[in-house]
Amino acid sequence: MATASVIDVDYEQPAAQGSVCDTRHAWARVPPEPSPVERIALKERIRRLLRERNAVMVSHFYVHPDLQDLAEETGGIVSDSLEMARFGRDHAATTLVVSGVRFMGETAKILSPEKRVLMPDLDANCSLDLGCPVDEFSAFCDQHPDRTVVVYANTSAAVKARADWLVTSSCALDVVSALHAQGRKILWGPDRHLGDYIQRQTGADMVSWNGACIVHDEFKALELDLLMKEHPSAKVLVHPESPADVIALADAVGSTSAILNAARGMDAKEFIVATDTGMLHKLRTLNPGKTFIEAPTAGNGGTCKSCAHCPWMAMNGLVELANALETGAGEIHVDPALGLRARVPIDRMLAFTAGLKNGQPAGSLIAGIGAA
Ligand code: 13P
Ligand code: SF4
C-alpha cells in the first residue's frame, strides 16, 4: 500500500520587533491518492459515519475536491475561513469535521466548545501561524501599547487571545477602515502582504508583523504580466496574501469567496487566478463556460514550494477523514480559559460582519474596542 510522502517546507520566522526574518523548517505529510474503487468505498463509509456520529463537514476551498464535494453533498459547507467559522458555530450537529488547516479547527472549537471538532490531520499547519509565536508577537504588541491589535485568522488561539480584533481576508478592509475612521492606530499581524494591501487601501497608520504565506508569496508579477499579454482578455483574480506587485495587476482582489463571486459576476471568458490551486475545482464547477488559468509562481524549474498548492491543506485526505470519524482521532482541544479569551475578538468579527450585512454603520460596530 502506498504511504504518505513527507515534504520539507521552509517558512519565515520574523524577529520580535516584527522586522528581520530567518528561515525555519517545517514539514507536511501528504497522503497518497486512493484508487477509484477505494474512493467510492471511503466516501460511502464517511457518509454513514457522518449520520451515525451526528457530524457535519466544514471544508475549505483549498482541500482536495473529494472533501469539498462530500461536504456539500452531505449538508455541510465548502467556503472561505470566515464562513467556515460562522457555519460551524451555527450548525446543530454535535461533531464538526473541519477539513483545512489547524487554525480553522481551533476557531471552530473556540466558537463551539461543547461540540467535538475533528480534523483529518492535526499537523496541518500554516506558515503564518508558525511564523507568529505568541511570546514574540506579544513582545511586539507590548512595544506599541497605543495601537489596536488586529490579527488575521491564520494564527494560534494564543495569538488570537492577545488581539483586540480578529479578521479574515474577507472583512479585514472593512474592520481596519472603520478603526482608521475613528482615528485608531493599528498593530497588524501576521501577514505582511495583506497588511500592506490594507494600509494602501485605507491609509491607516499601521505597523505590521512580517509573516508571509508560503503559497501566495510565490506569485511572480513579471511572469504574470507576460501571461496577461498572452491572454489579453483574461481578468486577473488575486488573493491579498500575494505580493504588492501581483496585487497591482489584479482586476479583483479578495478572499477565496470574493474570488469565486468575482469569477461568477464578471462576464469575461478567461481568468488568471493567483491563489491556491485547490480553488480551481469550485471555480471550474460553478463556471462551466469559463476558463481558469493558474497564475505563475517561480516559473520554470520551480520547486514544490512554488507549486501554488498549500502542503498543509494537502494533508486532508479521505482515509484520514474516515479514520477521524471512526476513532475520534484528530480531535481538536483548546484550553478552555484560553479559548474564552480568544473568543472575544472572534465574536467581535462575527458581530461586525453580521451588523454590516444588516446595514448597520461600521463605526457603530467598533465603538470602544481596542486602544484609543
Ligand atoms: P480565506 O479566508 O480567503 O479563505 O483564506 C484562508 C487562507 O488560508 C488563504 O491562504
Ligand atoms: Fe496558510 Fe498559506 Fe496554507 Fe493559507 S495557503 S493555510 S495562508 S500556508
Image: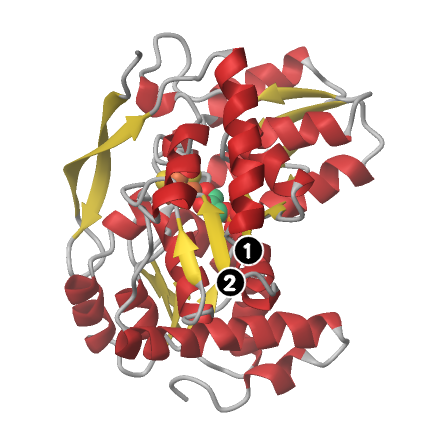
Q: Residue at x 55, y 83 (%)?
A: 366
Asked whether, in this view, residue 274 is left or right of residue 270, the answer is left
Asked whether disc 2 touches disc 1, contact meaning CB atoms under 8 Å apart, the reply is: yes
Is the CB–ligand 1 distance for label 1 below 8 Å? no
Question: Residue 154, relative to residue 23: is it above or below?
Answer: below
Pointer 1 residue: 54
Q: Residue at x 59, y 77 (%)?
A: 351
Residue for badge 2: 94
Residue 370 visible within the image:
yes
**Mark sitting earlier along the chain (2/1):** 1
Mark 2 is surrounded, within 10 Å at the Cα level, by few (under 14), some (14 to 19) or many (20 or more) other residues, namely: some
227 and 291: which is toward the camera:
291
Q: Given the current orientation, which residue lies at the most extreme top position? A: 300
Q: Residue furthest front?
A: 52
Residue type marked 2: Thr
Residue 313 placement, left or right of 230: left
Question: Which quarter of the figure has residue 361?
Answer: bottom right
